[in-house]
Amino acid sequence: MVRAYTRREYIKKIPGSKIVQYDMGNLSAEFPISLSVAVKAPTQITHNALEAARIASNRYMQRRAGRMGYHLKIRVYPHHIVRENPMATGAGADRVQDGMRKAFGKPVSTVALVKKNQKIITIETNKKNFKDAKEALRRAAMKFPVPCRIVIDRGEELVK
């Protein structure tokens, strides 16, 4: 895994994160069951993918469990700034292109550096909405560029 490129005081024009909220649903209630999406390999997850997963899972849970029937939390933050060295294409590109000379690149996106088995999204809910929460996390896992698994953190005895 690479060292995070996060020193924002040295970087100009950092692209903003598209993640709107990190906690959704009923924030005050205590729920007996907690499920999470955990990644199977170390990877980088962009802020776009995190926001897409948040929207997909939150929308599904809102329709199925209602606004007060769950608590969804995004557990990672995209700190790492990704750079890109844009390459020119087309006729005459070799005259205007420097190739790999001065190839530091410009900031294009932010990503969350995620380790193996790290939990990305957690949904807390009750027994009635367990299957809906599992489906919401499955839909969220589809948005990530890495294989994921759904883990029951708390309340496994209530589900069986």
Image (spheres, rainbow, N blue to C red):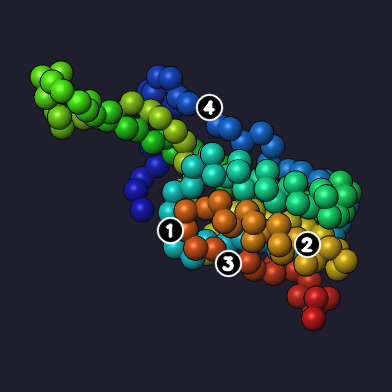
Residue at 27% x, 30% y is 85
Q: Mark 2: give few (<14), some (14-19) or many (20+) Cα within 10 Å.
A: some
Q: Does dot 2 land on a helix, a strand or a loop? A: helix
Residue 35 versus residue 54: which sits nearer the camera? 54
Q: Amino acid at mark 4?
A: Gly
Q: Mark 4: give few (<14), some (14-19) or many (20+) Cα within 10 Å.
A: few
* Quadrant of the rendered image containing residue 118: bottom right
Which badge, 1 or 3, is on the more N-terminal residue? Answer: 1
Q: CA distance from mark 1 to mark 2?
A: 27 Å
* Residue 45 visible in the displayed image: yes
Q: Are marks 1 and 3 in contact (CB under 8 Å)?
A: no
Residue that badge 4 annotates: 16
Image depth: mark 1 or mark 2 in front: 2
Which badge, 1 or 2, is on the more N-terminal residue? Answer: 1
Which badge, 4 or 3, is on the more N-terminal residue? Answer: 4
Q: Are marks 4 and 2 in contact (CB under 8 Å)?
A: no
**89 left or right of 143 in image:** left
Q: Are marks 4 and 3 in contact (CB under 8 Å)?
A: no
Residue that badge 2 annotates: 132
Q: CA distance from mark 1 to mark 3?
A: 13 Å
Image depth: mark 3 or mark 2 in front: 2
Residue at 34% x, 48% y is 2
Q: CA distance from mark 4 to mark 1?
A: 24 Å
Q: Amino acid at mark 2?
A: Asp
**Whole-percent x, y for residue 116 in the image:** 47, 62
Image depth: mark 1 or mark 3 in front: 3
Residue that badge 3 annotates: 149
**107 left or right of 40 in image:** left
User: Quarter of the image containing the C terminus?
Assistant: bottom right
**Whole-percent x, y for residue 87 in the image:** 23, 29
Residue that badge 1 annotates: 42
**54 left or right of 154 in image:** left
